[in-house]
Amino acid sequence: MRRNQVSFIVLQLIILIAAALPSQAQSPNASGISFTVSMPQPWTHLLEVEMRLQIPANLNVPNETDLVMPVWTPGSYLIREFERNVQDFSADANGRALDWTKINKDIWRVKTSGARQWRATYRVYANELSVRTNELNADHAFWNNAALLMYPDGRLNAPSTLRVVPPSGWKVATGLPPVAGQPNTFRAENFDTLYDSPFEVSNFKEIKFEVRGVPHRIVIDGEGNYDPQRMKDDVQKIVEAEVSMFGVIPYHDYTFILHLRANTGGGLEHLNSTALGFRRFNFATEAGWRSFYGLVAHEFFHLWNVKRIRPDALGPFDYTKENYTRNLWVAEGITDYYGSLMVRRAGLTSDRDYLDALARRIQNFQNTPGRLEMSAEDASFNSWIKEYRPDENSVNSQISYYDKGELLGLLLDLEIRQRTKNAKSLDDVMRYLYHEFFEKSRNYSPADFQKACELMAGASLEDFFAQYVRGLK
Ligand SMILES: [Zn+2]
């Protein structure tokens, strides 16, 4: 009897486990959200998206589902209305068309009427190359998932997979981990990670190196007058300088996506990748190379400062509206400070060149009348209506949190070093924030940042923050 009883319990357990796992058995991920991005006619600039949804057996099947298109992408603090590029939307369940309607500018409401498996398809016009938008043409495809993929409302924490169908001869590069055994298919643990991972699909060049055994690669689309060996050696030096400051490499691999064009610029940071735009012929001079190093060092530093050391409002994200923070002067300005400093620490510029460039930036800031009108915190908070929308009055009424933030980084570093006889520095503040906030899954507030600086300085810095950060000095 005992044996039979045991067998019966085992049988019951098997039935229970089998009942709990049907969606995992049938779908590549537990949530049953899978995207396919294809580009059968690149010259039309239309990226084609198929989104398949399978409701897990343990969830109720809703009668309708809202699909939401993000209106902005983290790292670029402006409402960009990505939904305006969506066209040809439709939805069906096993070939049966589903009714849908738009309920506002960025939400498509689909009447799923109890379907446990259904799909939505749409196309996205992609003809703007910047680090935060999408471009598809006969030469290549580049996109940001926040500007391409919708999420089911309320399911931002759900994992998903993304399969890319490239034209023949094109390769796929992204920071997302691949799904084993499925070509050009990648997985994201949640939508924040999915939206954090841009894609380059083309016949790109690749430069690879390792730092502390961790693979890094530079994926290059476009021609330019760079020396590949120098690019490899020098980018590696920047990575090593920044890794040695933090002492940890918090990613499995890292991808620099570099677009070389006649007239482009800028970068956007991600958890284990970055998208960079740089002028293809700017490698002719040392000043051009220094400008490239500065861009690389800034974006790479972000993998700690902003992607992991996160300001209060920046993650998890709300993709439907502005996410306000007073800390962008830390997230961007201090990243700018370290961007320049790391190029010096990597041995890629001289003290003289470093100080000359710093002096020019101090002079430019002092010559901006807006510094007497707007504080670093206000510049951060108002980014959504100011930083990316300059007009003829901007120089008089506002400052950039990049410019003042960099100088505040310098002043704080000097203040802490001076008060501690060089025993502590801003480096210690950044390491402290990484361990005390990122590693404990916390975001930091303006008060937290001030406290971290005071901890390293061993004294109150209230006057400094009141005058220089919240005030107009
Ligand atoms: Zn930045």
Image (cartoon, rainbow, N blue to C red):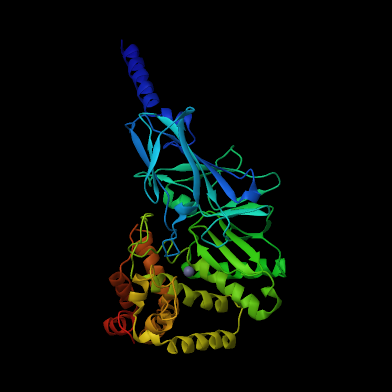
Q: Quadrant of the N terminus?
A: top left
Task: State whether residue 243 appears in this view.
Answer: no
Q: Quadrant of the C terminus?
A: bottom left
Q: Quadrant of residue 368?
A: bottom left
**Residue 26 placed where, x, y %?**
47, 29
Q: Quick check: 36 above or below 5?
A: below
**Residue 157 placed where, x, y %?**
38, 46
Residue closest to the eye, 362 or 12: 362
Q: Quick check: 10 above or below 436?
A: above
Task: State whether residue 429 appears in this view.
Answer: yes
**Residue 339 placed where, x, y %?**
51, 74
Residue closest to the eye, 429 or 50: 50
Residue closest to the eye, 122 or 245: 122
Q: Residue at x 40, y 84 (%)?
A: 396
**Residue 245 placed where, x, y %?**
49, 70
Residue that protrudes farthest toward the top in the picture: 1
What count of labels does the image hold?
Answer: 0
Q: Quadrant of residue 111?
A: top left
Residue closest to the eye, 196 or 241: 196
Q: Residue at x 62, y 63 (%)?
A: 259
Instruction: Report the side of 240 relative to 81 (left or right).
Output: right
Q: Residue at x 57, y 59 (%)?
A: 128
Instruction: Report the side of 110 relative to 27 (left or right).
Output: left
Q: Quadrant of residue 212?
A: bottom right
